Image (spheres, helix red, strand yellow):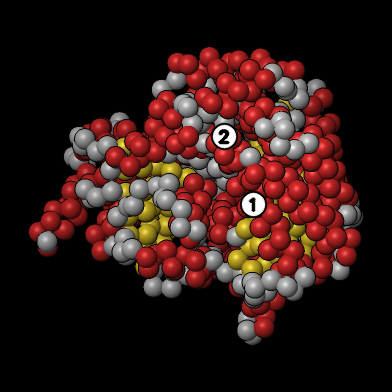
Amino acid sequence: MGDRREVFFDRISGAFGSGGEIARSQPGYRRRESQIAFAQAVGEAIAAQSTLVAEAGTGIGKTFGYLVPALLSGGMVLISTGTRTLQDQLFHRDLPRVREALQLGTRVALLKGRSNYVCRYHLRRNLEEGRFERREDIAVLHRIDRFAAISMTGDRSEAPGIAEDAPAWAKATSTRENCLGQDCPDIRECFVFKARQAALEADLVVVNHHLLCADLALRDEGVADLLPTAQAIIFDEAHQLPEVANQFFGRSVSSRQLIDLTRDAMREGLATASDAADWILLSRRLEQQIREWRLAVAGNGRLDRDRLAANSGFSEATVLVIEAVRALREPLQRSAERGPELGRLAARAIELERLLGDWIDTLTGHGDQSASESVLWAEAGTSGIALHATPLSLAQVFQRHRDAMPRAWVFVSATLAVADDFSHFTSLLGLTEARCETWPSPFNTPEQALLYVPTGCADPSSSGFAERLAHAIAPLLRANRGRAFVLCTSLRMVEQVSTLLQGLRSDPHHPIELLVQGQIPRHELLVRFRQANAPVLIGSASFWEGVDVVGEQLSLVVIDKLPFTPPDDPVLRARSDALRRQGGDPFGAIQLPAAAMALKQGAGRLIRSESDRGLLVICDDRLVSRSYGKRLRASLPPMPMTRLAEDALQWVTRDHRPSGAPAEPVSDAT
């Protein structure tokens, strides 16, 4: 046993050595001691079936660092990524390169959630019925049909010329609720079934956090596993995991699910059991109750338990929705033997009725669920409403799954620690015994980057902040000829800042191209940013991480303010209250660490290679004026700071300096 371990670790080190397999296969590869140490730590966790929390800074080479020990381990390994984009990149680009370099025959598979695969049955039925909300959906659905006829995977990300977020996909895919499973006439040609079979037979499977958390949640309900049982699970972009887990380890029910039920029930009822009920009347009644349910909640946004409990009209409207679901459910149950779809619809109605009933019973104090275990809240938008019961703590849930079967759990990200302290992340997931270690970025950020905190922006919550911010950054955007990200903490700020910066478009000497989130799809925004002469991309949450633009094309990053979660967020408030009752400090233990990790993600867009050079602008005076600012700055990559506009302007107008040249002194006027 000991000899095998020694061989395993020797092979890991050898692969990254100067003459090793990775070096021979990757042009320009340079041996990095930090990458080898990180890879060895991953290997040790796999061999010992232990838990590792690893912060690997930008430039460490973390993807190759965990792929090498994963592939060499010889066991079944599951790799979970934060996004489907990263999942595709890992499977189609990085994994083949490492597997080929190591000359291994490891069987690998890619597995996504069912909504990512064409469902032949639902696609065919919707094409035959021809009922569409938008005329353009017809043409898109026919293109999806042609794609499905020639595709080996049915993966929507591989469909040429069809946007992944096109509304027509909803009519070409299935959900857990409406999938016919083994009763489906197309089961032998099912893309989801084939993908799952490939995953069960593979040695290494690449999934994403959403799918993995969904599988763990289904195990809690006693449902058969979606994913194979692995000897090791590696979470890349692990900082995203707690937020994703919140969605799956709680319970949710939405008006969207209810509307889908009404429409599916009316269609199937009329087609196969027209004599069983007045399906049109029952469906219209439920849709009407759903509209009144939404109207019972004034305004949009997140609503906490206290506000919902005080709204008697909301509780009454919820009860009426439950009654309308029951009225639809009863004939579905009576007709279930007439066809598999009616049986599935009856099961959906039963589940939705139960979820709504449990939620409202808990809200009104009649349920079995203790208020200390879950946070009840609702999210109201222009298009509907969703009810949530979110775990007050994820620690016990994750601990239970980790105790269920001995295996390695490896959590990797560039942002897991706050000033070298991992306690925020480990406490969220109950990783009390985990080995925690940091491998800093090898980049020379003190020489490559400058932090500028303008003096004139004042309090971000005060009126006129957007105007002051635009005034402070406009000269820098002009001097840098765009090539900038402006990262905002809200969509409202995106709209305000983009409006205020419109004048940059008409600059007679160097017109700036503004690329604004929401005006064109995210993927197209990034493509245009990389190709434009003087682009400024203005976006919110989805651009703070997972975006990699190397070189001078992105040499200025502006962050509007410190990314604190709004204090009225229902989940944050409930968790803060619980911690406060235990004598803890919610700001220091919850809000500040979360803001530090988000800030580090945004700042991480700037320096992506050893030759990058850039300016980071954070337009929030609290970074230097408040006592906690020092802790936030300590979480950022090390770089000098200035408060002077002339220093910042000089930095962006200075000719690009070759890597390794001495940095000019800057002011640190704090």
Locate residue 614 relative to residue 81 in the image: left or right.
right
Name the amino acid, label 1: Ile
Q: Is residue 579 above or below residue 542?
A: below
Q: Is residue 190 above or below residue 401?
A: above
Please name whichever residue, 277 or 372, is drawn nearer the observer in this view of the structure: 277
Q: Is residue 450 above or below residue 1?
A: above
Q: Are there few (<14), some (14-19), or many (20+) residues within 10 Å of tag 2?
A: few
Q: In the image, what residue occupies the spot 69% across and 54% down?
A: 353
Q: Quadrant of the N terminus?
A: bottom left
Q: In the image, what residue occupies the spot 61% across and 38% down?
A: 342
Residue 143, image x and y in percent? Answer: 58, 15
Locate residue 16 relative to residue 636 in the image: left or right.
left
Q: In the image, what residue occupies the spot 18% across and 39% down?
A: 19
Judged from this view, the residue extending furthest toward the front is: 275
Locate residue 412 relative to residue 161 in the image: left or right.
left
Q: Quadrant of the C terminus?
A: bottom right
- Give the secondary structure at mark 2: loop
Q: Quadrant of residue 487?
A: top right
Residue 482, image x and y in percent? Answer: 68, 32
Residue 257, image x and y in percent? Answer: 69, 44
Tell me if I can see residue 429 in this picture.
yes
Please name whichever residue, 421 or 176, is drawn nearer the observer in this view of the structure: 176
Tell me if I can see residue 456 in this picture.
no
Real-space CA distance between mark 1 and mark 2, rounded to the nearest whole angstrom: 17 Å
Name the amino acid, label 2: Gly
Residue 181, image x and y in percent? Answer: 48, 37
Q: Which is closer to the viewer, label 1 or label 2? A: 2
- Give the secondary structure at mark 1: helix
Locate residue 109 relative to residue 379 in the image: left or right.
left
The answer to whether the residue labelled 1 contacts the one labelled 2, judged by CB atoms less than 8 Å apart, is no
What residue is disc 2 on? 339
